[in-house]
Amino acid sequence: MKALVIVLDSVGCGHAPDAAVYGDAGADTLGHLFERIEGFALPNLASIGLYEVLRKHNPDFPLTSPPLHPAAWHASLTEKSAGKDTTTGHWELMGATLRKPFATFEQFPQDLVREIEQRGEVRFIGNVAASGTEILSALGEEHVRTGRPILYTSADSVLQIAAHEDRSIFGVDRLQELCRLARQILDERGIPIGRVIARPFIGETSATFQRTSNRHDYSLQPPVNRLNRLQGLGVETIGIGKISDIFADSGITSSHPTISNADGMATIDRLWSATSTTPRFLFANLVDFDSLYGHRRNPEGYAKALVEFDQWLGTFLQKIGPNDLVIITADHGNDPYHRGTDHTREQVPVLALNPKQPELDADTFDKVAKLVERHLFPLNPQFFDTVFLGTEPAGGWPEDFTILTAHRPVGRAHSPEEDQQADERLHQHLLDSGLTPFRVTGASPDLSHQEPGWGFTGVDLATAAELSERFGQEAFFRIAGGRVHLHRDDSGTCWPINPGQLPDERGFFRDRLTST
C-alpha cells in the first residue's frame, strides 16, 4: 500500500479570498500562463481535472478538458494558515495549521546580527531585503573580494546567507555550518523565522554569478503533524527534494534530496517502483517552478517546466494501480506576471487518483493530510493499543502465529449471544481444518474492553486473510519472529504494532501479554 503527494512548488490557480491582505489581489499563476502564452497546454494534468479546476475560477477558460481519468477527483484548496511561504504551505498540507505568521524582517536587528557574527567568526555584508539575483549582482563581487558572507532576506520568513562555493573564498561546508549556527541562535532567542537558507553560488563576476543546487534549508521545528503520526504507526515516510529540510527531518524515515525537477521526477519513478511490504508515503517537492521561474518572473520558463512535468506525468499515470493514492497539488502561488518577486497568496489545485471519501473534508490545505492518512491508515487506531490475555499453550508461545476474533463483525448488528456463537463457529472451523487453536483475548490497555479470539499456527497469509473476511473482521494479527503486526488482507502490507509513542520493545507479543 502506498501514497504519493507531489507538490508543484508555487503552482497556484487564482488569488485566495484574502489575497488583498497580502497585496496579491488578482494574482493567478496558472490562469495568467494559459491566458498569455500561445499554445500552452497540459493535457495529462487536464486528464485528472486541472482544466475543470481552472474553469471554476474562470468560466471563460478556453481549453476543453479531455475525457477524465475514471479514478480522478479534483478541487481547489484554500490556505487557513497565516502566510504564503513554502514552510507554512507544506506544514498545513500535512495538517499543521499556523494561526500566527512567522516573523519577517526588512532588516535583521543589529544585536542578532552581532551574535551570529561573533559566534560564527564572520562579518556580514548586506542585511537587506532582496531577491537572490539582485543580491548577487549588488554584493557578489564584494563578497569574492573580501570573503564576507552576504546576509539578506525577502518578503518571506527567511534568513538567507549567500557565499561562494570556492573554499579559498568561503566554501559550502563553512556556509552550512554558519547557517546551522544561525538557526540555533534564532531558536535560542525564540525568534520564529521559518527557514535559514544556505545559498551557495559560483562565478567570477556579477555577470557570471550563478546559484547552485547545493542550497540547504534549516527549518523551524514543525508542530506534530501527519508525518509523525504515520511514521509512528509504521508507515515509511519518504521525503523527495527539500521535504526533509522543510520539516527539519521530523517525521521523515528517509530523505532523497534532488537538484532539479528532472532529478525529482526520476527519483519519484525509482522509489515508486520499489517493492515493499510496509505501507509507504512518498512526499515530493519539485521546486524549479518557484525558484527558477516564479521569483525571477520568467513566465516562458515557468510554462516550459510545466510542460516537461506534464509529459513525464503521461508516462507515470500508467504506473498507478487501483490501490495507490496519488495527489498533485501546490503550496502557494508565484505568479510570474505579478509585481515584485515574491510569492503570491493563492488557492492551489488538488488533483487526486483513488482518493477515499474526499467529500468528507473541507477544501483547505489540510485536506491532503486527511486523504493520505485515510488511505494509508484505514484501521481503527485502537488496534495499536491492544494487549493480549492468554494462558501459555502446551509447548510455549510460538514465535509465529495468527490471532483472529469473530466478535464485532464489521457492518453487522450483533449481540453478545451472537458474538459467542460466532466465536464457537470460528473455533470449530479451526478444529475441522486440522489446526490446534489456543485462546488469546485482545483487550484495551485498561482491560475494560475485551474480545476473545483464537491463536493458531500452520496457515499462510492468504488463508488467514480469507478467514478474517469470512468472519467479518476489519483486520487480524500476525506474530512473526515474536513481533506483532496488523494485516487487513493478503497483500503483504502490514503495520507493526509499536506506535512511535511506545518503546520499541512493546512491538513484541510477549511484552503485550498479560497471563491469566
Image (tube, rainbow, N blue to C red):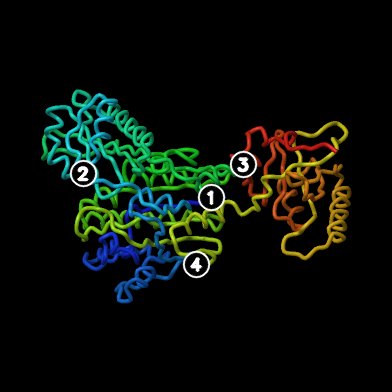
Q: Identify residue type, mark 4.
A: Pro
In the displayed structure, 484 sits above or below 353; it is: above
Kindly identify which residue carries mark 2: 132
At which x and y percent is residue 485? 67, 42
Label 4 element class: loop
Label 2 element class: helix
At which x and y percent is residue 390? 83, 40
Kindly identify which residue carries mark 4: 70
Q: Are marks 1 and 3 in contact (CB under 8 Å)?
A: no
Sequence-earlier tag: 1 or 3: 1
Kindly identify which residue carries mark 1: 2
Sequence-earlier tag: 2 or 1: 1
At which x and y percent is residue 117? 25, 28
How far is disc 1 from disc 3 in space, using C-alphas? 19 Å
Tell me the mark number nearer the camera, choosing from 4 and 1: 1
Label 1 element class: strand
Residue 96 as seen in the image, left or right of residue 413: left
How far is disc 3 from disc 2 in space, using C-alphas? 43 Å
Sequence-earlier tag: 3 or 4: 4
How far is disc 4 from disc 2 in space, using C-alphas? 43 Å
Tell me the mark number nearer the camera, choosing from 2 and 1: 2
Disc marking residue 499? 3
Q: Identify residue type, mark 1.
A: Lys
Tell me the mark number nearer the camera, choosing from 3 and 4: 3
How far is disc 3 from disc 4 in space, using C-alphas? 36 Å
Sequence-earlier tag: 4 or 1: 1
Label 3 element class: loop
